[in-house]
Image (cartoon, helix red, strand yellow):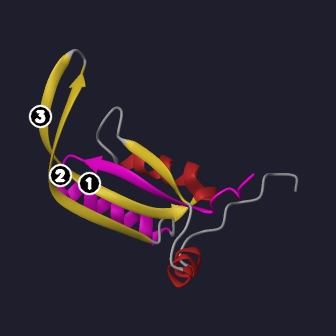
Amino acid sequence: MPPTPQFRVLFVTAPDAKTAEDIASGLVERKLAACVNVLPGLTSVYRWEGNIHKDPEVLLIIKTRAGIFKETTQFIREKHPAKVPEIISLPISEGSPAYMQWLGANTLFAKAPEGI
C-alpha cells in the first residue's frame, strides 16, 4: 500500500478578491498554508436551491499539510460568506523535493491526539 501523502492542495472559490485575499493571508499568517495562489476572473456555473447560477468568483489554490486539514477548513468556513463554501482537497503524491521541504517548513505540524 502506498504511503499516505503528507501534503494536500485545496481548491476554494470566493465571491470576490477581498474575501479571497483575507482567507489567503489568514491561512499563511497562521501557518495553515505555506502558499495560496489567488486567481481572479473565474465564472462559476452551478445549481443552488433549484436554480442555475452564473457568478464571477476568485479561485484559491492552497498548499497545506494533510495533518492540519481540519483546522485549515475550519478557518476557511469561519471566514467565508457562503453557507456551503467550495472546499476540495487533493493529495500531493509527488513534488520537487526542495519545494516539499519548504512546504513542510512553512506549515504547522498536526497536533498529537490528547492522551499521547
Which of the 4 image quadrants contains residue 83? Answer: top left
Residue beneath the point at 34% across and 49% down: 12
Q: Nearer the viewer, residue 96 or 53?
A: 96
Report the Cα–Cα distance between label 1 and label 3.
15 Å
Residue density around tag 2, few if under 14, some if 14–19, many if 20 or more, within 10 Å: some
Residue beneath the point at 24% across and 23% down: 48
Residue range (magenta): 1-30
Mark 2 residue type: Asp
Q: Position of residue 31 (x, y in %)?
A: 51, 70
Residue 90 vertical position relative to residue 52 in the rendered view, above or below: below
Q: How many marks?
A: 3
Q: Which residue is mark 2?
A: 16
Disc 3 is placed on an element classified as: strand
Q: Which residue is mark 1?
A: 59
Mark 1 residue type: Leu
Q: Position of residue 58 (x, y in %)?
A: 21, 53
| N-term mark: 3 or 2 | 2
Residue beneath the point at 63% across and 59% down: 5
Report the Cα–Cα distance between label 3 and label 2.
14 Å
Describe residue 82's horizontal placement relative to residue 67 as left or right: left
